[in-house]
Structure formats: C-alpha cells, structure tokens
Amino acid sequence: MSKPPSSPALAQFVAATAGRNMTQPAYIAVATGVAMMMLLTVEPAYDVLYRWIGALLWACLAFFVFEWGVRLRHAILAQTVWSYVVSLRGLVDAAGALAVPLALVSGAAPKTAWLLGVLWLLKVLPGVRGLRQLRRVLVQESGPLLSVLVIFLVVLFVASVAVYFLERDAQPAAFDNIPAALWWAVATLTTTGYGDVVPITPLGRLVAAFVMICGLGVFGLWTGILATGFAAETRRDNFLKTWESVSKVPFFAALGPAAIADVTHMLRTMDLPPRTTIIRKGQAGDCMYFIASGEVEVDLPGKKVRLGEGAFFGEMALLGNHLRSANIATTRLSKLLVLDLVDFRVLMARHPDLSQTIDAEAKRRELENQ
Amino acid sequence: MSKPPSSPALAQFVAATAGRNMTQPAYIAVATGVAMMMLLTVEPAYDVLYRWIGALLWACLAFFVFEWGVRLRHAILAQTVWSYVVSLRGLVDAAGALAVPLALVSGAAPKTAWLLGVLWLLKVLPGVRGLRQLRRVLVQESGPLLSVLVIFLVVLFVASVAVYFLERDAQPAAFDNIPAALWWAVATLTTTGYGDVVPITPLGRLVAAFVMICGLGVFGLWTGILATGFAAETRRDNFLKTWESVSKVPFFAALGPAAIADVTHMLRTMDLPPRTTIIRKGQAGDCMYFIASGEVEVDLPGKKVRLGEGAFFGEMALLGNHLRSANIATTRLSKLLVLDLVDFRVLMARHPDLSQTIDAEAKRRELENQ
Amino acid sequence: MSKPPSSPALAQFVAATAGRNMTQPAYIAVATGVAMMMLLTVEPAYDVLYRWIGALLWACLAFFVFEWGVRLRHAILAQTVWSYVVSLRGLVDAAGALAVPLALVSGAAPKTAWLLGVLWLLKVLPGVRGLRQLRRVLVQESGPLLSVLVIFLVVLFVASVAVYFLERDAQPAAFDNIPAALWWAVATLTTTGYGDVVPITPLGRLVAAFVMICGLGVFGLWTGILATGFAAETRRDNFLKTWESVSKVPFFAALGPAAIADVTHMLRTMDLPPRTTIIRKGQAGDCMYFIASGEVEVDLPGKKVRLGEGAFFGEMALLGNHLRSANIATTRLSKLLVLDLVDFRVLMARHPDLSQTIDAEAKRRELENQ
Amino acid sequence: MSKPPSSPALAQFVAATAGRNMTQPAYIAVATGVAMMMLLTVEPAYDVLYRWIGALLWACLAFFVFEWGVRLRHAILAQTVWSYVVSLRGLVDAAGALAVPLALVSGAAPKTAWLLGVLWLLKVLPGVRGLRQLRRVLVQESGPLLSVLVIFLVVLFVASVAVYFLERDAQPAAFDNIPAALWWAVATLTTTGYGDVVPITPLGRLVAAFVMICGLGVFGLWTGILATGFAAETRRDNFLKTWESVSKVPFFAALGPAAIADVTHMLRTMDLPPRTTIIRKGQAGDCMYFIASGEVEVDLPGKKVRLGEGAFFGEMALLGNHLRSANIATTRLSKLLVLDLVDFRVLMARHPDLSQTIDAEAKRRELENQ
C-alpha cells in the first residue's frame, strides 16, 4: 500500500476508494461477506462449499483492509488523520478491517470470529441519505422522547414487580425472580407478546391488561412525537435544498427576497439521472419544471429542442389543455425544481408579472410548434 | 371473439368490458373465483361440491379470458396494444387469463394450478381510488422510508448474529444457524412475537428487549414519515379536484385569481349519486353547498324547486337559525362543492361582496317561501 | 306505563329518562348488568350467588324495558316515533330491552340468553362525546382508508395462498386448507402473532417476514391517514364550538368579521362545572380567560368579587408579573374562552385597540386592589 | 435531623436536598436501591451477597427517609407543609420513605416488603422535563382519547362474549368463563397475541380476525390524536420558552410587537452547559445564534474573542461561504436562540433593517479578522 498504484485503472479505483463514500465494489463486498458469514453457520451448505466460503470471506476482509489502508493513507497525506479516525466513516472502516482479525488473533474459534463480519453492514450507514435528517429529528425531539422512555421504564419496572409478586406462587418456574418478570414485561409492553411467560392469576392478568394498554399509549406518544418532528424537519430540509437552486433560475431573479422565500417554500427539488423521461406525451399534467442545472430534450414532431439551465417547461398543460404535448427527457444528470399546479395558481395570482412571462413563453412556443 | 357480437345487450356488455374499469360482473367473478379456489382446498366441502366448484372455476376463468380478449381486440383496433399490455391493468388482465391455464398445461396438479386463481384478486387493484394518492406518498417520501428500511435491516442482521452467538449453546435446536436467528429477529423487530423461538439466556434476552424497543422506534418513524407525506398529499389532491369546479361556479367568477386560489383551499368536492338526500329538514347545519355539476331538488312546503349548475344552497342555516329548513336531494349524479361554516365565516369576512350576494339571495328565498 | 306517574320524584325521574341521554341510574344499570352477566359464567361465583345474580339481572332488564317504554311513550306524544325508532339511541334501547327476552322466549338456555346482556353496553355509545368527531374523520378519510383496506386484503389472500402452497407438505395439520392459512395470515399481518400456526420452511418464513413488514406499512399508512384527518377535524370542531361564544363577548364586539374569524381560531372553549378552581394564586400563568356564560368569583384579600358573562380575567399574569395574584373559581356551570399566551401576544400585536382595553382594565384592577 | 448540620459540606448537601429536584446522590440511591431490590429475588446472587444487598437496601432507605425529613423540615420552616405534602413530589417522597418500613412493621416477609422499593423509581418522575408537556397533551386531547377508550372497551366486551359463546364447547378449559375470554380479547385487541388462548372454531377465528383489525384501528386513532395534540403543544411550548428571551436581545428591540411575535415563532431556545462546542470550524452552517444569556468564546486565529448577552454569531456562514470559519464554545451555562437558515431568509426578507444590521456586523468582523 505504500507504493503508488502502477496502472491507471487501479489509480482510478484507489482514488474512488479514498473518497469517503461507498463504491460499488464495496457494496458487493458487504453483501458477499455477510452472505458468506451466514452460510458459514448453515451446516449442509458449509460442508459442501467450505472452500468457497472461506475464500470469499478472506477476499472480502482483504478488500476492507485495503479500503481502510487507502483511506488512512489519503487522510495522512491530507493531514486529516484524526478527523477521519473519529468520524463515523472512520470508525466503521476500522471495525470492518480489524474486528475479525483481532478475534482470530485472540484465539476465538474461526466460526465465531467470522461472526464479527456482520459489522461490515455498518459500512452502509454513513452512505444512507436521509439518515442525517432522521438524526436531526431524534435530536430535536430528544426531550419528549426521553420523557416517554422514562415513563416506559417506570411502567416496566413497577409492572414487573407487581406481576412477580402476584404470580411467583402460582408459577414459581416462570416468575422466579424480578429479571424474569422484566423479560415478561418488556415483551408485553412492546406488544410483542411471545407467550413463553404468561400470567395466569386473575390479578396478574389485570396488571398485564393494563400494561398492554400502556403499550398502545407509549406507541402512540412515540409516534406522535416523531411525526411532529418529521413534519418540521421535512419542511426545513426541502427549503435548504431548494433555496440555492432558486436563485440560479433567471425567471425568479426579478422577485424580491421576500417573494423568493415564498417561492422556495412552494418548490420541490428533484435530482434526475441522464435519459430519464420526465414528461410523457398524452399524460395529464399537474406540475411545471424549472431547470436548476443540467439539460432536457423536448421531443417535438420533426425536431428535438434542448433546454438548458434556467429554462422552464411543462407550463402549457397547466395553462390550457391538461395533457402533455411532447415527451421530455433529461440528457444528463439534472436538478429540476418542481412547481405543483396548486402552487402554480397561487404563485401566478400573487405575482402577475411572472404570470405574464409564462404566458408569453407559452404563446411563443405554441406558434413555433405550428 | 373475432365475430362482432350479435345482440344489442351483448354489444353493450362487450363495450363495458372493453372499458378498462372493473364491471360489476367482473367483481362477481373475482369474488366467486377466489371463494371457489379456497373451497377447493377444504376437504369436506370439496368432496360434496366438487362438480360445482369445478364448473364455477372454469366459468370464472372463461370470463377473465373473454375479458382479456375483448380488451386486447379493443386495444388492437385503437392501436394502443403496447400501452395496454404494459399498463398495470393489462398485466393483471394477462395474469388472470393466463396463469392458471399455463400451470395446467405445464403439468401441475389441478389443485395446485388453480391456486394461481388468487391472482384474480389483483384485478381490483387498478380500480381502487386513492391508490394513486398512496403511491405518490410512497414516492415522495421514499428517501426517509428507505433510510428507515436500512436501519431496520442493519438492526435485524446485527441482532440476529448477536443472539445466535449468545443462544447457540443454550438452544442448539432453535438457534441452529443465522437464518434461523434472522427468523426470530424479524418476528421480534416487527413486534409480531410468535414465541416459537425465544431467547432464554440473560444476555440474549437483553438483546431481545433492545430489539423490541427498536421495533417501536421503527414503527414510530415509519408512521411519522407517512403521516407527514399524507397530510401534504391530501391538501394537494383536494386542491386539484376542486380547482376545476370552482371556476365553473358563477358566484366565484367575480373573484381575482388570488382569491380563487384562496377559495379553492377552503372548498371540498363531493360526488353524489342521484336521489341522495344532502340536507334533512330540522338538522343542524354547518356547511353550505355550491353545485358544480348536476341538479338538486328543494322540497319546500307545497312546491318543489330545482337548482341547477352554479346555484348554491344551505346558506340560510349559516346566516341565522341553525336548523335546515327543507329537505334537499340530488336528482342526478352531481358534483357539489362544500364550504364549511369555519371557512364560510372567513370567506365572508375577506370578501364582503360575496357576503352581500349571499345575503340578498337568502332574503329573496325567505320572502318567496312565505 | 300507561298511567301518569303519581309522585313528583318519579315524575322527575321519568322526565329525565324520556330525555335521550344516559341518566346516572342507567350507567349503574349497565355496569351492574354486564358485571352480573359475566359472573353468571364464573362457576364458583355463580354457585354461591345465583339468587343475587338472577335478581340483579332481572332488575337491570326491567329498568331497560321501563326506559325504552318511557322513551317510546314520549316519542309517541311528540309524534316522533319513527325518528326515535330508527335513531342510534332508539336501536340500542330496543336491543337492550328486547334481545334477552326474545332469546329466552325462543327457547335458548338461560345462561346463553343472558349473554345478550352485553348489548346493554352499546347504550353508552350514543352518549360518548367526541364519537361524532371520530365518525366524521372516518367518513372524510374513507377513500384512503378503504384503499389501505383493499391492499391489506390483497396481501392477506396472496400471502395465505403462497404460504399454504409452501407449507402444506411440511405441516399438513396446521396448513390444511386456505382458510387455515388465512387465519395465520391475519394474525401475522396485524403483527398479533399468536404463534399457534407458524411457517417452518425457509421459503414460507421468507413470505412470512415480508407479510410482517407489510403489516408495519399498513399500520403506518392507517395511522398517517387518521392523524391527518384528525388534525383537520380538531381545528374545525374547535372553531364551531368557539364561534358562537366569541360574538357574545363584548370585548370582541368592536372587531370586524375578519378579525373575529381570526380570533376564533385562537380561542379554545372550556366547559367547567360549578366550584372549579380555574386559577390558583402563586402559579405561573400562561393564558387569560373570557367568560362566555356563567360566573366566576375572584378571591381577593379581604373581599370576593364576582365576574359575569362577557368579563375577562387572568390578563395580569400575561402583562407583567408571571404569577397569578388571586384564586379564581366558578360559581356555576360556566363556559370560558381560553386565550393562550402565544396567541395573546399575536392578538395584541395585530389589534392595538384590544391591547389598550386590556391595559386599562388591568390598571384599574390593580389600583382597586391596593 | 433536628440539629442544624455542623459542617459546611453537609449544610450545602442539606440545602440541595431541600430543593425539590433530584440531586445526584438521589439518582444513585434510586438506581442502587432498585438494583438491590431486584438482586434480592435472584437466588444465587442473594446467597452470595446477602450481606451487601441488605446493607445497601437499608442505606438507600435511610437516604430517602433523610431526604424526606429534610424536605419536610424545610417545608415547615417555609410554612408550605400542606402544599408540599399534596404535591406530586411530596407524595412520591413519602411513598419512598414510608412504604417499605410500613410493610416491614405490618408483618410482611422482608423479601416481600422490600419489593415496595420499586416505588423509589417514581421519585424520578417529577424531575422529567417534558412530562408536563405530555400531561398537557393528554389533558387537551382527553375527549377524543376517552372516546377511543370507550370504543376499545365496547369492542373488548362484545368480542369476548361472542368468542366465549362460540368457543366454550370446543375449548371448555381455555374459554371457561367470560373473564377468561376477556383475557384473550385484551391480548388480541392490543395485538400482543400471547397465543396461550387461541380460538379454534371457524366463527371464533372470524371474530378474532375482526378484533385484530379493530386493534389496528384503535392504534391508529390513538396515535393520530396524540400526534395532533403534540404538534399543537410543541408549537406552544417553544413559543413560551422563547418569548422571554427574545425581548432581552437588543437586536430585536427595534421590532414592533407584531414582528416580535413573528420572530418568536421562528426561533428555538437551546440551553447549553459550559464548555460545549456550538460551532466547529469547517462544518457546513445552516443556522445562526443569538445569546439570550451566558457567554461564548470565538476561537479566532491568534486571539480569542468573547461574546456576551445580546450578541449574535454564526451569521457569516449564512451570508456567503457556507462553512463555519471558527470554533465557538460556551464559557458558562448559556441560553441561545437558534435561527434556522430557512427562517433567516424569511426574516431578512421581511425586515430589511435587520438585514442591514447583520450585514454591517458581518463586514466589520471580516475586516477585523484580516
């Protein structure tokens, strides 16, 4: 790993690996590694395939060690070792590369040591979009969520002591001690209800019924809190993503800052890969699009027109006839701003000048297409 | 199927079948077919009724083949074969017509082949109103939903490896390999809790308790995301349905576009079959109605008055006395716009001219009725 | 029941009974009746108490027959028999009075016939406040809820056929026929998970895992829809309850209709029984109150001041010092309008004249109390 | 406890104890006490550690008695005995101090008496932030929640009578009487599904399926109601916490009351302990901060600048470059007001004068740092 890679393909691969996102080979390695780790425990499969399973596991491990090495080297060169090592990405990289070897070295049975390969799964977490959003919701709502957790725990402990007291004579084996009763209580309060331990005395069942209904309540509170937090976060997240793009669209440039904030709340950002059909001819149309970056191709009869950054399209279906009049597809990775019919009406009503711009453009296009 | 139908009733039936929505006979065929398919597996019923069951199953199959044929022919005539075949409707039609015969032809036991009759159920899906709305919510919120799914899967795998490690010595039969532990984990994380496999070691139970509580969290996040998406979608859907109708009501014609957008947010669309009573005399009234299309009949003492498109009614209960003064029912399929008392107040306050129009009409009606 | 009641107490009782709400004796009769009906099935209790249980059951039945008779007679006198008989109240009254006698007459064993006494419970339903609100939410959201139900049913049937096919050879007893598989599917899709029937083949378990995760999704959609509907309904309901009261408070009389609609959205109605303490001296205050009807008593040092309809109180804690300066309690059934600190600030900001009125009144009160 | 404490450390400790919040030793005592109480029931642990367990339990009890005594004495001195005794805090203090001794005195077996130590857990409840918020939601939404509870109970009773009737012949042991059927019904309606009692007749299973689906509905309604209530409460709570602080920030002093109400809705309060890093250099910035109280230290290259009450920071990342340009941490307990980028844009658009102030300050700082 200390020598620079000798071939350009390898160089490219190392560069992609050094970037801190998951590469496609990494996804494949995670899937293969975890699948092999599972097969290792399935007797008949292992007996037949033990050579393959072993080889693939070692290959995956090698890949993760290599990946970690490349990133460490990159971080050393960029003098960001510490920030890489303590970052979420750095920690899961280290765990993926070191856990299994350390277990093997420290003398664990190989079948047991390879179980730690499940930690490779954690490598996908830093790459999940929306995880940041989820984390923010949990942080913002941590106060009420913790309150519900405390209530959950208090109900859990009080109920298990009560049921222990009520059931220990009737079922000395099942309700032997309070930890056993806690096991029952947690399965009941989460409405999991294994049924391996069940109260049989009338009073015990009364307490159990109360615990189950509390379970519903805890569920409800938890969900209510998260739903509230999520609504706020979604609104915020959408605004942040859209704000930057709006200012790049000349169409909105004439608006004052208050109106731009207003418009931003109405728009939704959409990232599209190349050659994606956005509008299909003959479909009902209920939104129009602004191109924040990228390019689209309009498939008019007899010719193809390309629209670039700052242009808009799809407005004709909103103005008169409700059917799309042409196929439109992206030519490369594009970021579009979507304006729903609902908000289109409101926007046109509030800003008559925008309305005129759109009307004029629509008329010009109609003439052109005739 | 190649000859044109000879009788007018059949012609009508074929025309209805060619339309891509479910006809009433189709609903009956689906219900009968699935019921017979179920009876086929119930020993005592089958022994007694095997002739009937067989006959009805073949009849249902014949109907679905006929339906598919009619639609294919219609699509060929209209030169839309491809778009029909790849549409959801076309796929479920083909599955309903072909699955069972193909299974029979390929040598499956008849009782097994007819099980594929359950695919007939899918034919109801394209006809479900609101499914489009649900799909849009799932698409809009796919980002956060996928994040939750990834978290779900990571917890699932890590927990099952942990419990496999902790329980394999205590319960070698139940926690034989990791797939078996995964089965336990999925039943626990969804709070289903079959109880067929249950951890018994203290540490295994601790992990299980943690998994259950994570289950609550996943539930909560999932629900919160869907609730947020649904609120936005409902608002949007209602606006789209109402917008068209509002502009047809002369009462609102005088309003500017901003006010119309405003009004549209307040109104709710209601589609009513003929001879439906909308208002019952003597009931408390908390909304008024505008007729977007159709007709209603007001049952005044001694005479019946008909109100057509663009008229409004029910405003008197909002202005003075709170009880409805006459029965009002539709005479044919009608689309009404409903304005709740809440929004009536706000609307009248914001647009005093509308208020005067309604007052004048209400007074005129009162005089007329005396 | 044909003779007029002879004593004034009885007359009063009959009058209360004729009113269509639950009287206190009716609640007691329902509770007693259902409790006795349950005891009837508990062997040891019945053996000891059979005389008492029988007597109480007959007494409850007699009460419900009497209640139904009084209401029928009242309805006949008021010429509203039909509307009473077909109303929810009329139907549950009839069921409560007739079900058990009819079962006894038609030859059912007494212990079985009395089980129908559980129908007495339905008598509490028409009296539940908020049930109308719930019904409205269900009606408003019936479209999406039905869509989810259809999805639920399609998943249910398809999954049970699949699991039947996969498990029938491995577990011929448990997955004997499709109805048996449906029983498994419904317990799994609702995440109930009895565990009496559980798939054991790998593919069966895979289908089961998918069904469980669908169960979470159905849950989430269902809840999301109801939460959305509920939010809209709560807002509407509150507006309706508050609107009437606001116009009776002179304080708001000077406002135009737009401002009144605005204010109505901010206020919350509160019905309080007599002698309820609203404000406790020394507590932190975060809202002020307007008296829509009724009367309150302010417990000032050395004297007691009564405030009647249209007055307001609690504003001092919002203006300066944050602690309540006196105990205030209702003297009779009162309806108060509550204005939260949040909305108080907004309202004062938007309507400076209201602000002045409140300031003046607060100063006058402060001077008076010195 | 009657003598004044002799050492300053003890005096300080007593003073902290007299305050009605949980002290750190109290948290430790609760955790130790409950853990020991649980160990008491675990045979092997008890046999080995019985001396330690006994000693620690007595120590915890002594602590709680001492705490209760100190608070009682403090309340007597402050002449607020009654209000302390009937407060939630007073009740749980009394329960914690008296329950176990009373049980021991009244002759219960020691192992049973100490079970009451679980009541010590209740002592954490009054200290939970956000519990007040939860309580307010439950109170506000008590109407609909009770309606759902009534529906829950009616379904519960009707279903258990129906299943008792349908199953009593098939399973005389499991469905012996209605209370036994109720036990089944509550486990089913809450979707807990122990599986200890399960209907086996076709009709009984049909009723059970209906009960499970009702369970989903009850869940959904419950959650929907709580989510709605929680959204309203969160908005209100945030406003109350923020309002006070806003008026102390000179930056907002120039705004009129309407604008201040407006700004308050945008800000979020954050309480931070000393030496907490708020901003990390190089991170992406999406909010700015106002100091309502406390102090922060900006770690500029070569010097450290302290900002006190009323100052703001973090605005530069919002104006131009999106990366934070310095580390900023609190020096002591501080209350910050956070303004999200979303709201920053809106605020600047609505109040151009604020925008100028921030621009000027940002420019001044940039010059200074060069």
Image: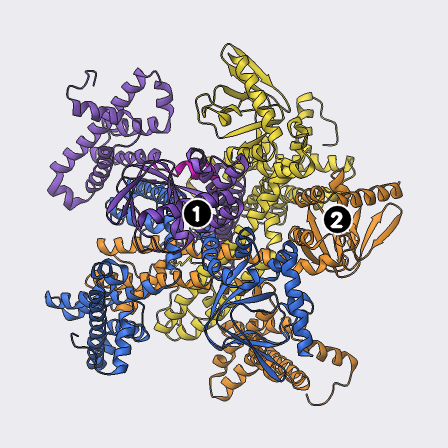
Chain colours: A yellow, B purple, C blue, D orange
Q: Quadrant of the C terminus of chain C?
A: bottom right
**Circles 1 and 2 on the same subunit:** no
Q: Position of residue C349 (x, y in %)?
A: 65, 55
Disc 2 designates what residue?
Answer: D279
Instruction: Name the image quarter holding the N terminus of chain C.
Output: bottom left
Instruction: Residue B133: say if magenta.
Output: yes
* Chain letter, disc 2 residue: D
Q: Residue A256, image x and y in percent? A: 69, 35
Q: Local crowd at mark 1 within 10 Å, few (<14), some, or many (≥20)?
A: some
**Residue B195 in view of the camera:** no
* Residue extending furthest toward the top: A302
Q: Which amino acid type is marked by label 2?
A: Ile
Residue beneath disc 1: B359
Look at the numbered disc 1 and give the secondary structure of its residue. helix
Nearest to the observer: residue A46 or residue A26:
A26
The magenta stretch is: B128-137
Residue type of the residue flagged with mark 1: Asp
- In the rendered view, would you say C151 is above or below B325? above
Residue A288, quarter of the rendered image: top right
**Residue at the image point whose x is 63% and y is 36% from the top:** A242
The reply, left or right, for residue A248 in relation to residue D137 is: right
